[in-house]
Image: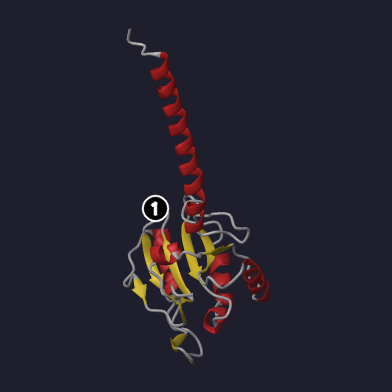
């Protein structure tokens, strides 16, 4: 009594096996979808830039290979990264779905980038950073709140209209604020450049 008939025990065992198989199948199916949603490095490995640099502020700079304004900012992005090495983790983020890993590698070589690059194919980082333009930067402090998103500086007044030199330096100010726990006068400043489209 209490143990059930051989038939019921057989059914119960088969039910448990079937349940385990279904769970394993769902796990295997969900994993690729989760990876597709994540940003990936140039080898296709999922990367969350906000989790791999604990204790550091994180700067995501959104660029694309064919945006002339973004390309003009390459030396400034490199300089800011070098100035804050050890305290800030810089990442280049390529949101254009049409740009392959090889195109991005060539772009980095052509413009002398020494920064890790990510492909944000599903625009998760775009949405998390509230950006719309390349080039545009997002700054997260060490505790991961978004403290700034917007232009790098005011070199460009409009598309095709540039100053001789920038007179404000929003990204640099945002990095300093993130490192020193200060509040910015403006947490977002519109950028000038190439629009990030969800229709690519």
Considering every residue shown, the one lying at the far front of the view is 7
User: Taking 84 as reference, is 2 left or right?
Assistant: left
Give residue 6's position: percent from left, percent from top: 42, 14
What is the quadrant of the N terminus in the image? top left
Give residue 197's position: percent from left, percent from top: 44, 76
Relative to 152, is 38 above or below?
above
Residue 67 location, quadrant? bottom right
Give residue 30's position: percent from left, percent from top: 47, 48
Considering every residue shown, the one lying at the far bottom of the view is 161
Relative to 52, is 182 above or below?
below
How is this picture coloured? secondary structure
Kind of element beneath mark 1? loop
Residue found 47% across the figure and 60% down from its top:
58
Q: Which residue is mark 1?
A: 143
**In terms of depth relative to the viewer, which is nearer, 117 or 13?**
13
Residue found 67% across the figure and 76% down from its top:
110
Give residue 10's position: percent from left, percent from top: 44, 20
Residue found 48% across the figure and 35% down from its top:
21
Q: Which class describes the residues within 10 Å of circle 1: few (<14), some (14-19), or many (20+)? A: few
């Amino acid at each position: 009594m209490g143990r059930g008939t051989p038939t019921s025990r057989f059914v119960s065992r088969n039910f448990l096996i079937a349940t385990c198989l279904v769970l394993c199948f769902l796990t295997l199916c969900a994993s690729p979808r989760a990876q597709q949603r994540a940003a990936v490095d140039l080898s296709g490995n999922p990367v969350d830039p906000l989790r791999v640099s604990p204790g550091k502020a994180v700067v995501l700079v959104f660029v694309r290979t064919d945006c002339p304004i973004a390309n003009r900012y390459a030396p400034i992005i490199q300089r800011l990264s070098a100035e804050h090495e050890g305290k800030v983790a810089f990442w280049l983020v390529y949101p254009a779905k049409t740009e392959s890993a090889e195109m991005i590698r060539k772009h980095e070589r052509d413009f002398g980038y020494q920064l890790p690059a990510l492909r944000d194919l599903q625009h998760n980082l775009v949405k998390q950073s509230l950006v719309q333009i390349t080039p545009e930067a997002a700054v997260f402090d060490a505790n991961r709140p978004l403290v700034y998103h917007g232009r790098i500086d005011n070199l460009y007044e409009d598309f095709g209209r540039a100053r001789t030199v920038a007179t404000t330096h929003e990204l640099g100010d945002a990095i300093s604020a993130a490192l020193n726990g200060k509040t910015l006068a403006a947490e977002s400043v519109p950028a000038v450049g190439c629009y990030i489209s969800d229709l690519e």
